[in-house]
Every structure is written in C-alpha cells, then in structure tokens.
Amino acid sequence: MSEVKKIAVLPGDGIGPEITQEAVKVLQQVEKEFGFSFSIQYGMIGGGAIDRVGIPLPPETMELCEKSDAVLLGAVGGPDWDSYPPELRPEQALLGIRKGLGLYSNLRPVTLFAGLENSSTLRPEVLAGVDLVVVRELTGGIYFGDKERTTTPEGEVATDLLIYHEFEIERIVRLAFEIARGRKKRVTSVDKANVLESSRLWREVVNRVAKDYPDVQVEHMLVDNCAMQIIRRPATFDVIVTENMFGDILSDEAAILTGSIGMLPSASLGEGTIGLYEPVHGSAPDIAGQGVANPAAAILSAALMLRHSFGYEAAAAAVEQAVRTVFEKGVRTPDLASENQLAVSTEEFGDLVVEEL
Ligand code: ATP
Ligand code: MG
C-alpha cells in the first residue's frame, strides 16, 4: 500500500463544482485501480467564500492547501461579484494561492485528441499530431516590476519595469528541460532577444542549462515568429518555455488548437512540493448548473496532479488514455458536438472515463 496523498479540492463557483466532481470521481477510480490512497478534503474559495465569510481566500482554505500534497481547483468568479472592489474579487484568491505556495511555473499541455480536428477553427491537416506544452514563468517579468505614472508638461508618462533575475530564469528553464526529457526531447525557448536585455539574459541562461541536457534538442525563437509558427505548424513543437507575458499570450493562442476551452488542463508548480491543478477555462456562469460543461479539462488536470505532484506516471497516462478513448468512440460534450450530434452530460462523460479506466 502506498502512502496517503492529501488532496485539497476547491470547487469554487459556476461550473467549478460540477466539473471537479467528475475529476474527483476519476481520482477515486484511480485509487481502486492502482492501489493508491487519497485523502480528499474540500475547501471554499472565490465568490462562494465571499458570500459565506466575506473574503475570497479564507485563512482556513490557505491552511488546508499548505498541509496538502496537491490542490485541485475548479474555477472562481461570476457576475454576482463583478461589482466588488478589486481586492475583494474572487480572482484575488488565485493570486493569493500562487503567492502563498510559491508557484513560479504554469504548464499548459495542448493535445489534440483524435477526432476533434473538426471542432477547431484551424484546418485538420494543420492540426494533425499536435502535442505540445507551454511552460510559462509565472512570478516575474513585466507584470510584477515597478509601475509608475507621472505627469509631465508633455503629458502623462507610464512605466512598467520588465525585470528578471538569473535564478528566476534558471529554475523555469530547468523545469522545461526536465519536462522535455519525459516527452519528445525538444525545447523551444521563446524571447525577444533582438530588442530586450532581459531576453538576452534569458538566452544565455538557456544555453548554459542546455549543457546539462545534451539529450534534449534546443532552439531559440523570437516571440513574434513563434506566434505565427504555433498556428502554421503546431505539430512541430514539443516544449515551449518562455517568460510571463509571452507565455500568457502564447498559451491562450495555443488553446485554440484543441477544439474547445473545455479541453485544457493546467498545472502550477513551484518552490515547494505542492502543486495547483486547474482547468484553463473560467467558471462559465452562462452554462453553470445545467450539466452541460465539459469536464475533460478538470479530469486532465487531475492527471497532471498524478504525474507532477505524486510521480504516478502510469496512472496519469491511464487517465489521459481513458479520456482519449472516450473521444475516439465518438462521445462528445455539447461544446464539441456538431449540430446533429447527440451530446453527453458532464456526469455521463465522467462516468464513461471511469468505465474506460
Ligand atoms: P475567466 O475570466 O474566469 O477566465 P471567462 O469569462 O474568460 O472566465 P470562461 O468562464 O472560461 O471565460 O467561459 C468562456 C466561454 O467558454 C463561455 O461561453 C463558457 O460557457 C465556455 N466554457 C468555459 N468552460 C467550459 C467548459 N468546461 N465546457 C463548456 N464550455 C465552457
Ligand atoms: Mg478568461
């Protein structure tokens, strides 16, 4: 019997509870199939927490996360809380957890499951074989540098400082190389080294770290070119590693390769051993409570948890394969179904994945 892994589950708002329920169901099946033992504890977060205790990230939720091995999050936010002041918005909870757990990397695997080519807006022949992961730096760069506004005789002046420390680059780049080792062994480092000093430092660090990974092929690409190549020849990428803002933009761009926002999982990892796993999509208030949300992103996020926080690679791959098989059999959730296609509910999809497992 393996050791007990503690999982904090934070369902959140909108479709969050519906989709995390399916992910938990899958995790419980993994327990049975693989002989693992999970202790699952629930915490409140986001708008629901605001309604109950007045703040989006109550201290008891943060404590629950800190004493867990991994956190599975649904989604937060919705129109009910849009008029609240910025520090009292549900989204604030995410920043709080990232900071609290020291999560400096965001991983977004982008996989096109067979049969879903036609659900994307891109041509099927361009999409064939897409299987890449964007590794985005999460705690540095222009989003966090000093910001300033001054008034001069010529008018307003605004400054955002783009700052990167060598150690911040090194740890994310190393992670990208480690991930590439377990995949197709190719790293594309994306920067703007022709104009940015921080990008030149980024490139130096990548070249240095690359020496420790002679088995991994590395290339440098300017971000403008990468933005084009991602939709021109997406299947040629394996691991894309880049700084915060470039990663923000490229990972949303890459998202359209999969057919639906409901397909995309993410993992945020950091200094400690605790990882945060959540779908890329939001709380989708427009479809909440109807049982029509696609739970694949949440289920695939649970698979990333098995892989990255627990090292249960076989179980992670089995969950991913189960999702793949369900789609291969022609099953579609409403977001992916064409007009004359019968779609399954959120719960039915979860049941089918459990059955495949
Ligand atoms: P946030 O600001 O939290 O990212 P958002 O407003 O950007 O939220 P989402 O909540 O992700 O966006 O929703 C965008 C659209 O995608 C909505 O129409 C929503 O219904 C749809 N959508 C999001 N997630 C899913 C899902 N799992 N299954 C089906 N449709 C989804
Ligand atoms: Mg959004």
Image (spheres, rainbow, N blue to C red):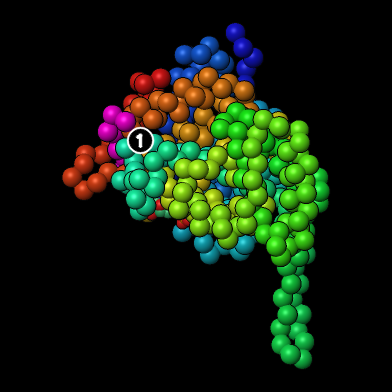
Q: Of the residues shown, which amino acid type is indicated by label 1?
A: Ala
Instruction: Please name the residue shown 40% across and 45% down the image.
Output: 127
Query: With respect to residue 12, does 148 lie above or below?
Result: below
Q: Which residue is mark 1?
A: 114
Query: With respect to residue 96, does 183 lie above or below?
Result: above
- Total marks drawn? 1
Q: Residue furthest left?
A: 340
Front-most of residues 98 and 254: 254
Q: Is residue 267 magenta?
A: no
Instruction: Please name the residue shown 40% across and 30% down the image.
Output: 323
Magenta region's main secondary structure?
loop
Quadrant that contains the C terminus: top left
Where residue 71 sits in the image (x, y, percent)?
60, 34
Q: Is residue 248 left or right of residue 143?
A: left
Where residue 197 sits in the image (x, y, percent)?
77, 61
Where residue 172 sits in the image (x, y, percent)?
71, 42
Instruction: Please name the residue shown 34% across and 41% down the image.
Output: 116
Q: Is residue 155 left or right of residue 340?
A: right
Front-most of residues 257 and 291: 257
What residue span does the magenta drawing correspond to?
328-334
Where residue 253 sits in the image (x, y, percent)?
49, 54
Instruction: Please name the residue shown 30% across and 46% down the image.
Output: 118
Q: Is residue 155 visible?
A: yes
